[in-house]
Image: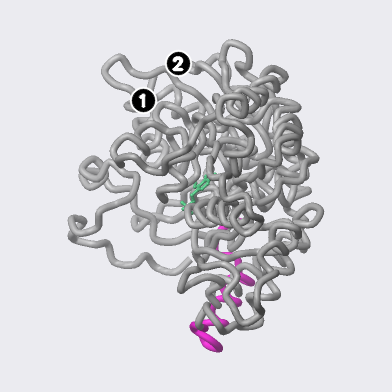
Amino acid sequence: MTKATALPNDLAAYWMPFTANRAFKKSPRLVVGAKDMHYFTADGRKLLDGAAGMWCANAGHNRDPIVAAIQAQAARLDYAPAFQFGHPPAFELASRIADLAPADLNHVFFTNSGSEAVDTALKIALAYFNVRGEAGRTRLIGRERGYHGVGFGGISVGGIVNNRRFFGTMLTGVDHLPTTYDREHQAFTKGEPEWGAHLADELERIVGLHGAGTIAAVIVEPMAGSTGVLATPKGYLQRLRAICDKHGILLILDEVITGFGRLGFAFAAERYGIVPDMITFAKGVTNGAVPMGGVLVREPIHDAFMTGPEHAIELFHGYTYSAHPLACAAGLATLNLYRDEDLFARARKLEPVWADAIMSLKGLPNVLDIRTVGLTAGIDLAAKPDGVGKRGMAALDEAFHKRDTMIRAVGDTLALTPPLIISEAEIDDLAGRVATVIRAVA
Ligand SMILES: Cc1ncc(COP(=O)(O)O)c(C=O)c1O
């Protein structure tokens, strides 16, 4: 690892996202390098990464082939206009991603983030019904405790109160399914809970209220990551698919976290044996190395746009940096690594080992629930009497500053989601460190 870069002497200018800025700047958590399973700090500490950065470095950090591909691409073609021009890696990456997706999810619209992917998918759904002559289908359905990024579309269908309540009216005509999490019926579940498939039937209630002809799409995560690793109950997604089919509603799976191996498959749609109409992805597509997101679209939806005059733009949507050359290069090198190291199958194989290791934390002080699915885990801790979120933040700090470990905390829930290259010994090590952290914040 190269010598640490100089530390900044002024932290004021940078307004950090989703961060308690004042607390951070009093006690900064800075990293200056990374390799494989570890981050490095300026003072030479080596942190075990239990979070794959932010659910994105699935192949581990700073992998040589990805670094080399980005460097070579930057030297060859730094930028190509995204509208009206193309460059070969964009087409190659789209084909490679489509090859990984189930059934006829054959077309890819590139964005630069998960938020943009979500807003793009929602817009494609609305435009699709427009071009089909069903412009009355405008309603969008999300789910409580869903996270779909921070665009106005994403926060509207999302179900996190603090992400919504400061931002006005958002999109109109949005409804929400109930969350699938219920501790009373699901506590300490490994994998998909037995209880809760019936909650998909709430879509029938919403259809009954508004009429199917007003609803364009339903968007859900196969596993709600940002609100604490909430796996969908057994049979839930299949039921949702069936209800959508019955009423001609599009089903969008937000796989920004679950895509690229997190649940043991290229996409979680495969794990659950369903074919959504669209899949949103980001994060793991480039191993987090260059920002990129996108939407996988089924053949008939794509084809519905390809009917007008050939000289005309079919979809009035796109970004300056859609399919950016550096992101495409990183994406292709990343997909090669996933394939060559068989990382999706590796995650599948490690899942029981992971689940046992993390579930062993049951019984530690303040642990109210533990959930695991794929190579992810959520650990709910009891809030401190003096404030919700304080124990979670204390755990994050303790892990970073004293236990050389990177974890995520959402409120008082600890989220673990390591790179898929984690070894069995490192799984035990991580579980042990988290146990120490939980005891330290008791
Ligand atoms: C399911 C899901 N959708 C969308 C997003 C937003 O992605 P981004 O932060 O790249 O905009 C996230 C981010 O964590 C996510 O988990």
Residue 371 versus residue 297: which sits nearer the camera?
297
Q: Where, quadrant-wise, is the C terminus in this rendering? A: top left
Instruction: Using the numbered discs, state the Cα–Cα distance from disc 2 to disc 1 in whole angstroms.
Output: 10 Å
Q: Position of residue 354 (x, y in %)?
A: 67, 34
Identify the magenta region: 60-80
Residue 11 placement: quadrant: bottom left
- Disc 1 crowd, CA 10 A, few/some/many (<14, 14-19, 20+): many
Q: Nearer the viewer, residue 326 or 138?
A: 138
Instruction: Give the left or right position of residue 373, taking residue 431 as reference.
Output: right
Q: Residue at horizontal 48%, vertical 37%? A: 174
Q: If you read the primary sequence from the N terminus, does the residue marked by circle 2 or circle 1 appear first? A: 2
229 relative to 198 in the view: left or right? left
Spot the residue most to the top: 184
Q: Residue 65 lies in magenta, yes or no?
A: yes
Residue receiving disc 2: 366
Mark carried by residue 391: 1
Q: Position of residue 332 (x, y in %)?
A: 66, 70
